[in-house]
Image: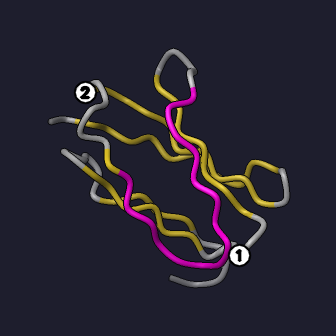
Amino acid sequence: MGLNEFAVYPNPAVNSFVVSNDFGPNSYVEIYNVLVMQVSRVDFSSNGETEIDCSNWEKGYYFCRLYNNGQIEKTIKLTITH
């Protein structure tokens, strides 16, 4: 990934997915369901990837919203299929 990139894969996901981020240590991801309820938050201490277990989430659509320095940078729609 290049500078300032954000990815979520695999998409659709079954039991887990990876959030990859090159924005740096002031970034975090919040994940919301279609009712706009936050189901997860990942804080990044550095660039990199983290795997999120979604095996106990309801199947359906979710939105992964990346924040950098408190500002929304990008939103990715995620599908959980189980």
Query: Is residue 62 left or right of 29 when viewed as pictured?
Result: left
Query: Is residue 37 left or right of 55 when viewed as pictured?
Result: right
Q: Residue at x 67, y 72 (%)?
A: 45
Q: Position of residue 7 (x, y in %)?
A: 47, 63
Query: Is residue 46 left or right of 54 when viewed as pictured?
Result: right
Q: Position of residue 67 (x, y in %)?
A: 72, 53
The question of residue 45 being in magenta is answered with yes
Alpha carbons under labels 1 and 2: distance apart: 30 Å
Q: Considering only vertical position in the picture, is 22 above or below 61?
A: below
Q: Which residues are magenta?
A: 38-52
Q: Along the line of sight, which residue is nearer the eye, 62 or 42?
A: 42
Disc 1 marks which residue? Answer: 24
Q: Considering only vertical position in the picture, is 81 above or below 72?
A: above
Q: Based on the displayed image, in which of its 4 quarters is residue 46 positioned? A: bottom right
Disc 2 marks which residue? Answer: 59
- The type of residue carrying mark 2 is Lys
Query: Is residue 16 left or right of 32 when viewed as pictured?
Result: left
Our reading of the magenta stretch's main secondary structure is: strand
Decide: marks 1, 2 in contact (CB < 8 A)?
no
Q: Based on the displayed image, in which of its 4 quarters is residue 81 positioned? A: top left
The question of residue 7 being in magenta is answered with no
Mark 1 and mark 2 lie on one chain; the one further toward the N terminus is 1
